[in-house]
Image (cartoon, rainbow, N blue to C red):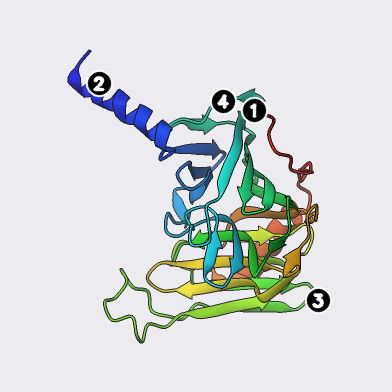
Amino acid sequence: MSKKLLTVLFMAVLSLQLGAYEYFMESGDYRVRISAKFKHTIRQIIWKKFEIGRPTGYYGAILVPKPGKFIGAGHTEGGMEEVLSVKVDCDGKNIAPAPRLVLKGKKITVDKISRFANLLFNIRLELTPEGLIETKRFVALAEQKIHLFYAHIYCFNKSFTDYYALSDTGKVISGKFTLPKLDKLPKDRKNLKKAWHVRSDVRYTSEYDAAAKKGVLLYYPQVIKGKLHKSTFWEVPYAYMKYYMVTDVPGVVPANWESPTYTVAVRCFEAATIEEMPQAVKDNVEIASKFQYPALAKPELPKK
């Protein structure tokens, strides 16, 4: 066996042991990169060769037990998300995740049971040619303080130019991302501007890139009530148009408290002009409203 091949095999084994590997889901025009290092969360979303979601920042769910203390994916300020089990399925076939694995199929799922402090989560990613569905729910194993909880996070491309949303009351919220795009984080951060957009409970929200003529829709089959910024885009010009679903949960939950199911559908679309964006969004909302959404079981600790 050659020295080069031995090195490759050694690095592959080391990656598995450290959990520092990535694998891919491909269905239709979608390619989703998954990071084992970051607790089997999304790392990048590509649609028709266009980067929708960037490998910058973190995805998934984030628990904030107290201000500044984040838990989830790459955040460890408040503790470590503990992945207790992972199951990957491609068109009905169970497949063990591995470095550089590419899963191609009509329906690919990544199911995991994770513990965030005293909260036990059941989380599913489901990719089909129609789009990506992310679903999660949790139960409290013991009393848990919750300063904030982000049910869904996406690090969308900083190239997006416009947003369009519909609030839970039926109000259209639209506008432009106006901060200048930066190639990298400047050394002088003192006067660096950032901005928040939408900041409402929504039935759906979306972004559009006028140059690429592509957009992304986040559709909620059931409105998730939020607090603080609620459903929002955080415009960070050097990094991303980051999306947060800051969810309304009690400040303290007792043992055995169960959350509702938090579900969002991510579907990409094309529109020739910004004027055509609203109709393109509505057309895709109509499609997403007919998806079959998974019903997650109550999370349970895996049997030893």
Q: Residue at x 78, y 41 (%)?
A: 297
Q: Which residue is mark 1?
A: 91
Whichever of labels 1 and 2 marks the residue nearer the N terminus, that label is 2
Q: Which quarter of the figure has residue 289?
A: bottom right
Q: Give the amino acid type for the residue marked by disc 1 in the picture.
A: Asp
Whichever of labels 4 and 3 marks the residue nearer the N terminus, that label is 4
Q: Which residue is mark 4?
A: 95
Image quarter where the C terminus lies is top right
Q: CA distance from mark 4 to mark 3?
A: 43 Å
Q: CA distance from mark 1 to mark 2?
A: 32 Å
User: Answer yes or no: do the residues labelled 4 and 2 have beta carbons within 8 Å?
Assistant: no
Would you say 8 lies left or right of 169 here? left
Q: Give the amino acid type for the residue marked by disc 4 in the picture.
A: Ile
Which x, y percent locates residue 167?
A: 74, 74
| Residue 42 appears in the rendering | yes
Task: Between residue 188 and residue 199, name the one nearer to us.
Answer: 188
Which x, y percent locates residue 150?
A: 63, 63
- The furthest residue to the bottom: 191
Foreground label between 1 and 2: 2
Q: Which residue is mark 2?
A: 5
Dot 2: what SS? helix
Image quarter where the N terminus lies is top left
Dot 1: what SS? loop
Would you say 64 lies left or right of 167 here? left
Mark 3, residues whose alpha carbon is within 10 Å: few (<14), some, or many (≥20)?
A: few
Task: Between residue 142 and residue 217, name the one nearer to us.
Answer: 142
Foreground label between 3 and 2: 2
